[in-house]
Image (cartoon, grey):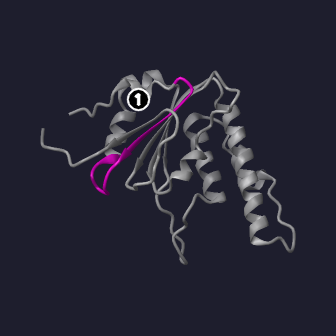
Amino acid sequence: KEFQVEEKYFNARRSNRVTLRGMGGIGKTTAAAMIAHQNEIRSYFDHVCWINLGKKFTTEKILPKLQFSMYFDFLQKICQQIGFDTSLFYTERSFLYFNPGDSQLKKSAKEVQAMEKAKELMSRLLRGYRVLIILDDVWDNGDCDWFDFIAADDSETDLVLFVTTRTDDDFRFTGSVNINMNLLSEE
């Protein structure tokens, strides 16, 4: 059967966030894929992008938030899916320079500034388009904000962030819709 989500959730008019929440393995990713491939969705949006944020691991620990290099990788993936020049978001082009003696706090602040500049650039690139960005397997609510590419003065762009998550974080913001996905029946 086709998975149906009400059209009002995807009629952006500026910026909107739809969060599909449920326990692991329940079918959130499958539901998001089914939605992304519906003809109505494909015909309404100029671009549909898919980013799997997931929980990132290192040999030392689980990374708690979206990291600088990961963010630039995700921006490249969005560009690739849309057909924009991916080289705009190589980390080497971020003009991020550390000085000898920079503290960890100073380095982190510089990374955040570079990420903010990259977000502004992506906002300019997407201006005037209708875009659906599916953020799959989100573990930290704050990560979603990095993908809300609507600038304050932008009245031309429609953006919907469709988020799948298993966390109980409060994903609410103006224009958000939360859907709790329970076990599906055989119907």
Residue lying at 19% horizontally and 45% vertically, measured from the top left = 184
Q: Residue furthest bottom?
A: 60
The picture quadrant where one finds residue 109 is bottom right
Residue lying at 58% horizontally and 45% vertically, measured from the top left = 145
The picture quadrant where one finds residue 121 is top right
Q: Position of residue 76 (x, y in %)?
A: 62, 46
Q: Position of residue 146 (x, y in %)?
A: 61, 47
User: Does 5 sit above or below residue 171?
Assistant: above
Residue to which mark 1 is pinned? 9
Residue lying at 35% horizontally and 29% vertically, measured from the top left = 38
Secondary structure under the numbered disc 1 in the rendered image: helix
Q: Amino acid at mark 1?
A: Tyr
User: Does 42 sit above or below residue 29?
Assistant: above
On the rendered structure, is 72 left or right of 100?
left
Q: Position of residue 79 (x, y in %)?
A: 61, 40
Q: Quadrant of the C terminus?
A: top left
Q: Position of residue 114 (x, y in %)?
A: 75, 52
Q: Which span of residues is magenta-colored?
A: 13-28
